[in-house]
Image (cartoon, coloured by chain):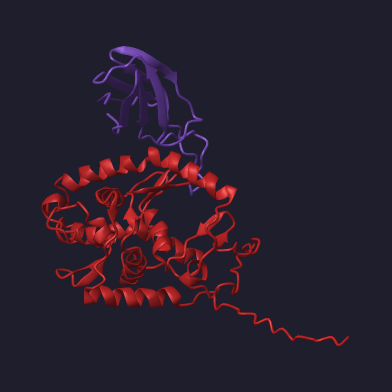
Amino acid sequence: MKQRLVGALCAMAVAGGAFAQTPKKPAAKPAPQSPPAAEAKDAATLEFEKFRAEMEDSNPAELFEMKGEEQWKTKRGPKNVALAESCDLGQGVGKVEGAYVRMPRYFADADAVMDAERRIVWCMVEKQGFKFDDIAKKPFANANFTPDITNLVTYVAGHSRNMKVAVPLKDPKVHEAYEIGKEIAAYRAGPYDFSCNTCHGSDGKRIRMQNLPNLSTAKGAMSGVQGWPGYRMTGGVMLTHQWRMGDCFRQQRFPQPKYASDAIAYLLTYMIGNANGQVYKGPGIKR
Amino acid sequence: MADPMKIRATLKGDTAEIRILMAHAMETGQRKDAAGNTVPPHFIQAMTVEVGGKKVVDGHVGTSVSRNPVFGFKVKGAKAGDKVVVSWVDNKGDKRTDEAAIA
C-alpha cells in the first residue's frame, strides 16, 4: 500500500504580540500562560465577582465623596474662592453632573487637553490661588493622609454615576491627544522594554491573580476606567487614575511621570476614549 | 466631632436592614510607618445603635476591625420613618453621632 504522505503544513500563526514575550519580573515566577480568551469564566473569577458585588454595596469611597463635596463648596485658598463658584469642568461653572465621564477634554482657557484631576488642580491653582508645587509635593494618598485633590476627584466622579463615558473624540485637539496616547501606549522603554501594551494590549492576560484588562478594547478599557478613582482596601486608601498611571510607570521601571502632565493626559484620553459608550458605575473599590 | 458616617436603613417587610459606613483610621498601634516609627493606636472602642428610641446594639469594638469599617444589622419590628441613631467613641475620647430615618 502506498502511503501517501500528506505534508500538512501547520501554519504556526504566531500572532504578533499575543503570546510574545511573557513579562518577567525580578525575584518572581514568570507570568502564567494566557488562558484562552473565552467567554467562559472560571470558578476563581466568579468568586471575585461575588466578592466585588458585596464590596461595592458599601464603598468607603462614599466617605471621600462627602469630604470632596465639602471642599468643593467651601471658599478656600489665598483667593478665598469656592470651586463650586469658579471651576468649569466642561459643563459650565460649578457644574459637576456628568463632568467626569466627559473628560479628558480640551479646555480653551488652559489651552490643553485635561483629565479630571489635572483640570481640578488647574482650577485650584488659577481660581483659588494654591501653588501647583505644593499640591504636586504630595498629590496622592497614603494610610495617614488623603490630599484634597483626591477627595475632590472622588466627589466629581461620584456625580457621573451610572452615566455613559463620553470623551469628545471628535474635537480635533482631543483626537490629537488620543492618537499621541495610543503611540505612548505602544512605546517600549525602560529596563524591561515594556510598553503599556505589553500587559494591556491583548485579551486574556494575567499577572498571578490579577487579570489585566485589554485597554485597546471598549470592555477592557472600561474595566480599567471603572477602577479609578477607587478605594483600595489594602491600606484603606483612596486612589485616583493619575495615581494608577504613575504606579504603572513604576512597575515598568520607567521614571515617574510629572504630576498632571501632558503625557498622562494623552494616555488617559486614549484609555478613557476607548471606553466611550460604556456605563461608569461611580468610584470603585478594590482589594 | 469626627468625620460623618453614612447610614443606610431600608425596610424589608417588618425587618430593617441597616448598613453603617464609618470613617476612622482604626490604627491598631502595631503598624510601623515608612520611617520605621510605630503608629500610635487610634481606634473605635464602643458603639451603640438605637432604632425608634430603643437601644438595639451596645458593642465593644476592637483592633481587629479594619479601617473605614462597614457594619450591617437586621432589626425586627421596625417601622418606616423610625430613627436610627448610631454613636461611637474611640480610645482618644473622640466621638461621633449620626442618624437616619428608615426608608
Chain A is which colour? red
Residue A82 appears in view? no
Residue placed farthest to the front in the image?
A: A1
* Residue shown at 31% from the left, 27% from the top: B10
Q: Colour of chain B?
A: purple
Q: Position of residue A53 (x, y in %)?
A: 44, 42
Pick the front one: A204 or A147: A204
Q: Position of residue A26 (x, y in %)?
A: 62, 65
Please identify the residue farthest to the right as the structure is shown.
A1
Image quadrant containing the N terminus of chain A: bottom right
Q: Is residue B76 above or below residue A7?
A: above
**Image mark count:** 0
Q: Percent from the top left, x then y, of residue A111?
A: 18, 73
Which residue is pictured at 27% across the width and 29% down the height? B1
Q: Residue B63 versus residue A10: which sits nearer the camera?
A: A10
Residue at point 16%, 48% (across, down): A76
- Residue B89 in the image: state x and y as whole percent: 36, 23
Q: Classify residue A202 as left or right of residue A274.
A: right
Residue B51 in sight in this render: yes
In this rendered view, identify the residue nearer to me: B7 or A260: B7
